[in-house]
Each structure stands twice: as C-alpha cells, then as structure tokens.
Image (cartoon, rainbow, N blue to C red):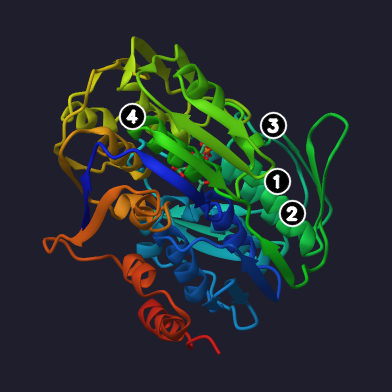
Amino acid sequence: MSVYIIEGGVPLQGEIAVHGAKNAALPVLAAALLPPESHILACPSLTDTAAAMDILRALGCRVTREQEGVTVDTSSAQQWEVPERFMREMRSSIIFLGAILARFGRARVSFPGGCELGPRPIDLHLAALEKMGTVIQEDHGCLDCTVPQGRLHGAEIFLALPSVGATQNVMIAASTALGRTILHGAAKEPEIDDLAAFLRGAGARIYTNSAGSMVIDGVEQLHSVTHRVMPDRIAAATYLCCAAAAGGNIVVRDCVPGHLQAVLPCLEQAGCRIQRYGDAVGLRSQGQLHSFGWVRTMPYPGFPTDVQAPLMAVATLAKGTTVFTETIFENRFRHADELRRMGANIRTEGRVAIITGAEQLHSASVVCTDLRGGAALCIAALAAQGQSRVAEIRHIERGYEHLDQSLRSLGANITRSRDEKEEETHAEQNYIQDSPAQTDQAAADAAQKTGPEEAPA
Ligand code: EPZ
C-alpha cells in the first residue's frame, strides 16, 4: 500500500484540468454491457473504474484501454454471475445488476455490503427490478435473479427517495425492456444526464415527460456507441478546496461551472475570489478565511454530499463557526477524528458537525477513512505547517486520478511512497499497471480467476 507525504504551507498556483467523472464512468461502464461495442472517452484511470472493467471481463467482455479511452466489446459476453470478490471490492457494483438482467435475463450477484459511509441499502434497486419482471431470491448472501419471461418489461416505478444508483439501474434495465417504463422521483444529478446521453447514443429512447418524470421506451437492441464522460464535478470542487485552504491562485479547467452552483457560494462566503468561465473556474484565496454558515447536503442541485468532507477541511481554517448537516449518509463524518489530529476544532453529534476555525493546523500522521474523507486530509495537510503523512491512500485512488501529480503541478510539495506493510488489491494492481500492453494479460488473468469460462476472444 502507499502513503502521501505532504509538506504544507505552500500556496498553490497554476492551472489543472479535471479528469472524467468517476460517478458517470461507472454506470456507463455497466451500461456498456448492452451495445455490441462502446468507446468510452475520458474514462478516468481509477481503481474503481479498473474494478468495473474487471467485472466486464469476468462477464466475458473484451475491455481495452487505449490513449483516448476504453473500448468494451461484448461479442463474447456470456457470464451472468459477478464473482463475489468484485462485488465486495466496489460497493457501487450493484449498478451492474440491471445491465446483466437486460442482457441475459439472469443474474447472480452478492450483496454489495455496507461501506465506510454506513449501510448502503439496495431495496429501491431490487423493488424496481422486481416490478420490471425480475424474481429475486436471497441465497447465502447472494441475490439469485431470474426473469421468467426471458425479457424485462416496462413498469411505472415510484422511487421513495431520489437514489442515484437505483435511477441508473432502472434506466439501463428499461432501455431494452419490452414496453414503456415511467420513473417517478428519479435522481437529477448531472451523472444521470450523462448516462442518458450514453444510452441515447446507443439508440435508447429516454425522455422527460411534462410532469418531470423519466420515460423510457424499450428498444430491441442497443447499437455501438462512442461517448465522452462528463468532467468530474467532485474532483473540480476538491481542487478548489485545496487552493482555498492552502492559499494561492488556480484555475480548474475542463469543468462545468454550473455543476458547482451549490459549492462556489460557500467558497465565496469563506472569502475566496471566484471567477466563472465557460468551462473553467478560477479561485484566488488570500489571507484569513471566514466561516460560511450552515451547509446541508442535499440531492442535486443541492449541496453535494461528496463535497462535504473536502469543504469541512476548508472550514477548519475559517474564522468563526461553520455547521454541516449530512442528510444523505448516516456515517459520513469519519474524517473528523483525523482532522482533529491536525488541530481542527470539530464537534459532531449524529448528522451534525460544528466546526470552529483554528488559527493554524499542524502536521500529523493521519489515515484515510474513505474516498472523500481522504481528500479532506490532503487538503488539511496542504494548509498545515510541517510534514504530514497520509496513509491508506487506496481510498483516494478509487476516485481521484493521480492526485499527487495533479497537486504537484500546482506547486504542492507532495510525494507518493510505498508503505510495505500492506499489499495491493487486484484493482489496484490493474490501476497501477493499467496500460494497453497489460490489458490483455489482465483479461486473461481475470478470466482465469473467475472460473471455467473461456478467456474473452
Ligand atoms: C452515488 O451513490 C455516488 N456513487 C456517491 O458517491 C454519492 O455520494 C451518492 O450517489 C449520492 O449523491 C456513485 O455514483 C458510484 P444513492 P449511490 O443511491 O448511488 C439511500 C463518492 O464519494 N438508499 O443516491 O449509492 C442510501 O442509503 C460516492 O463518489 C436507500 O435507502 O447513492 C443513501 O442514504 C460516495 N435504498 C441515499 O439513499 C436504496 O436502494 C442516497 O443513496 C438506495 C439508496
């Protein structure tokens, strides 16, 4: 395993381009099981996308990564069972269920289990797929799913809450189901629009009716498609938080300022000077930051829960008191303990965190608890005086493409070094070695490890 060593107190200067969005690429990779061939441009190189590519290979697809993106060839896909270790490696792998059922009429996946953020129920996913004709039986922690009629059928579905993953599972499953699906209460995150663009590009018929509900008219078969993944709005927000905390003057390019409409006002209230361009955001942070009141995480277009931890790191340096309410996940303050080790003044009570800004943070040895919490530790370390050590950065590498290189390009003093104590997971090996030369070997390895079926053609 590896660690980051960060020498704090260095203001950031320069420009940084945002990579493709993890939370758009993952559902697009799942949906890529349906067309004969998909070319996915700007697919970020992350351990989570490497894990998703492993799952596609285990299903018999040929997956290759070239310079400009990832190609998924499903002509040899014949497996409908996802090996348990892949389901455990990435909690959001449940997103493959709708695609596997749509392709094969059968699926066997294990419960994705909880994660660092608390229990991650999938009841909305399963209820929707059952309404579309799936019979689901739990069997020793696995979900054995069959579609007795062979093909899913359309249904009118009401989501009790705007679950991003459940919305995506329904969109993918409904795209080739028999008849019409009407989805009420769908999530409205930009990543949903990006998945809809991919599916439409492959011939799916998806639109929004006058009542604001999503309507999907199933087609017989999706055709090959080329799609460019949207920029990662969470990564863009994270880089801005780095400069807000460490000070300096940066421009975050290749992003969509409109996706940050709930985040930028907080940074402006904190005292940063923000400039919005067509596809970029500039931030200048000088002198003392100020507290920015009360931040409640909400479904889009509200404040994104994934930016709560990065912005909390900024709040630890903002004069006065800032309050966060985490309304989406029940256990998303685990980074607070680690931030306290750096001198942060944070009190948490259930889903509320109260931050009183400190004059200065000091360096410390800290451990990442989850993806966005890990980013928060890096942000704090960039601002703290002295050298910090951030361990368990495997969490960070799930969702940020070479964060250390990106920050070094802005002048940060950050290096990545190995921590011999722990070995890498399979996805991490892929991530580190993921290159065209390796891809076929990884496919053969993955196919070999997943059971008797033939390696992809
Ligand atoms: C997606 O997770 C993102 N992950 C998350 O990003 C993000 O935080 C989340 O959406 C909210 O925006 C990916 O896209 C891969 P949900 P997802 O279903 O789909 C409850 C990151 O850091 N719920 O919208 O799992 C659930 O417990 C990650 O990049 C049910 O009760 O989120 C949660 O409280 C973290 N039953 C709420 O809904 C269900 O069947 C939102 O979950 C499904 C969800």
**Distance of mark 2 from mark 4, alpha carbons?**
34 Å
Q: Pointer 3: what residue?
A: 185
Picture coordinates of residue 38 (x, y %)? 67, 71
Q: Are marks 2 and 4 in contact (CB under 8 Å)?
A: no
Q: Residue at x 45, y 19 (%)?
A: 271
Q: Pointer 1: what residue?
A: 193
Residue 313 tag number? 4
Picture coordinates of residue 160 (x, y %)? 61, 29
Residue 246 tag number? none
Q: Give the position of the C terminus as an image quadrant.
A: bottom right
Picture coordinates of residue 375 (x, y %)? 35, 42
Q: Nearer the viewer, residue 245 or 97?
A: 245
Q: Secondary structure at mark 1?
A: helix
N-terminal label among 3 and 1: 3
- Give amino acid for label 1: Asp
Number of residues whose C-alpha sits closer than 10 Å to that of mark 4, classed few (under 14), some (14–19) or many (20 or more): many
N-terminal label among 3 and 4: 3
**Distance of mark 3 from mark 1, alpha carbons?**
15 Å
Q: Secondary structure at mark 3?
A: loop
N-terminal label among 2 and 4: 2
Q: Pointer 2: what residue?
A: 197
- Relative to residue 303, is residue 422 depicted above or below? below
Is any part of residue 187 visible from this angle?
no
**Which of the two discs, 2 and 4, sits closer to the camera?**
4
Q: Nearer the viewer, residue 155 or 284?
A: 284
Q: Nearer the viewer, residue 292 or 171?
A: 292
- Give amino acid for label 2: Ala
- Give amino acid for label 3: Gly
